Image: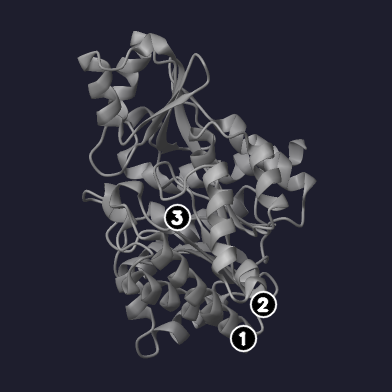
Amino acid sequence: MILGYCTNIHPAETWPETMDALRTHVMGVRDRLIETGDHPAGKPYPIGLRLSAQAARELLQGDALWKFKDWLAENDSYVFTINGFPYGSFHGTRVKEKVFQPDWTSPERVSYTQDLFSILAEIAPASGGGSVSTLPGSHKTFQADETAIRTNLIEIAHFIEDLSQKHQIDLHLGLEPEPLGHFENTLETLAFFERLHAQAQSPVILANRIGLNFDSCHFAIEFDDAAPSLDAISAAGIRLSKIHLSNALSLNPSDPAAIQAIRHFDEPTYFHQVIAQRLDASLARFLDLPAFLAAVDSGETSPADFVEARVHFHIPLDAQPAPPLSSTHSHVEQTLGWCLRHPTACNHFEIETYTWGVLPGNLQRPVVEQIASEYRWVLKQLKSY
């Protein structure tokens, strides 16, 4: 098991900005973990890298990539995975639906992903392979042409295959289901991959190179229990490319205090989709937290009809929100438990709490402290099994 954290928590859109975050925050986390005995001194440190399209292009220019390889070697570190979901700006501006643009119908998304794999093929260790995570094709509101999505994914699968053979390294792309994505839950994921495999002329290449990035926050929001979902995905022959360890908010909508408390998480940067479970176990989906709150405030939605609502707002793995709010941390625990029972199912694990900059004050700590604490929480869970 390779465990890292995703550097998308650090604002960085250019390669120099990304390199600065690596030198300061990432090395700061590594050093903190060594101090506490949670990462052995002298053991290479795994990095989960986030690169924007601009940063990826800059890294491929001149000798920048070779200098980065030297820096990794000098600092006894390596990159095993890249987050290729957000193409452009990811902090300090309205992200929301823009994080799904360009989607997998566009040549820009293909080109960006090719850049990421070209980088990863040069810097990832052959022993552990390299993964890139990406969006689930598109967003439902875009009404994207799925045939174009599948065609582009098949094209990138062959690109990854060629790189893997050339560099003798196992490279793979993980599609990441997200609430209101083109496919978002277990059933939609199984159906999409069935259609994708049916279109492929080389199904073995596709199965080896295109898999799933299982985000525990996202599947928890869908009310899909971890073990049955992972069982079904594995049984369908879908590769588990990477596991995102992340935590969502939960509340009882019929509690007025919980409705009031969740308003503190309404911020304008990211999508905070809400899925609420009715008394009959059916689900209601809301595009964003403001839409959910507006439906409650207007009387369009009766909170008494729901037993639980889950909100796509990543909170630290080790920090529970104050009552009356709760979290989906048990889903992360179940995910880790399943993976330990199936140790060959997936080798890449990444902590991903990118919302540090927009967390309410009572949950916000110095970023290095937060990430190191999340590492320790994961390691403690692993030891408990």
Q: Nearer the viewer, mark 2 or mark 3?
A: 3
Q: Residue 300, percent across and down?
A: 25, 17
SS label for mark 3: loop
Give the CA distance from mark 1 to mark 2. 8 Å
Q: Residue at x 52, y 42 (%)?
A: 185
Name the residue at 32% across, 42% down: 271
Is residue 329 shown left or right of residue 358? Answer: right
Residue carrying label 2? 126
Q: Which image quadrant for residue 380? A: top right
**Screen quadrant of the N terminus:** bottom right
Residue in front for this viewpoint, 146 or 258: 146
Q: Which residue is mark 1?
A: 167
Instruction: Report, in whole angstroms, how far the alpha carbon at label 1 lies from the one at label 3.
Output: 27 Å
Which tag, 1 or 2, sits closer to the chain's start?
2
Residue 56 percent coordinates (x, y): 37, 75
Q: Amino acid at mark 3?
A: Pro
Which badge, 1 or 3, comes first in the chain's sequence? 3
Numbered badge on residue 136: 3
Q: Which structural element holds mark 1?
A: helix
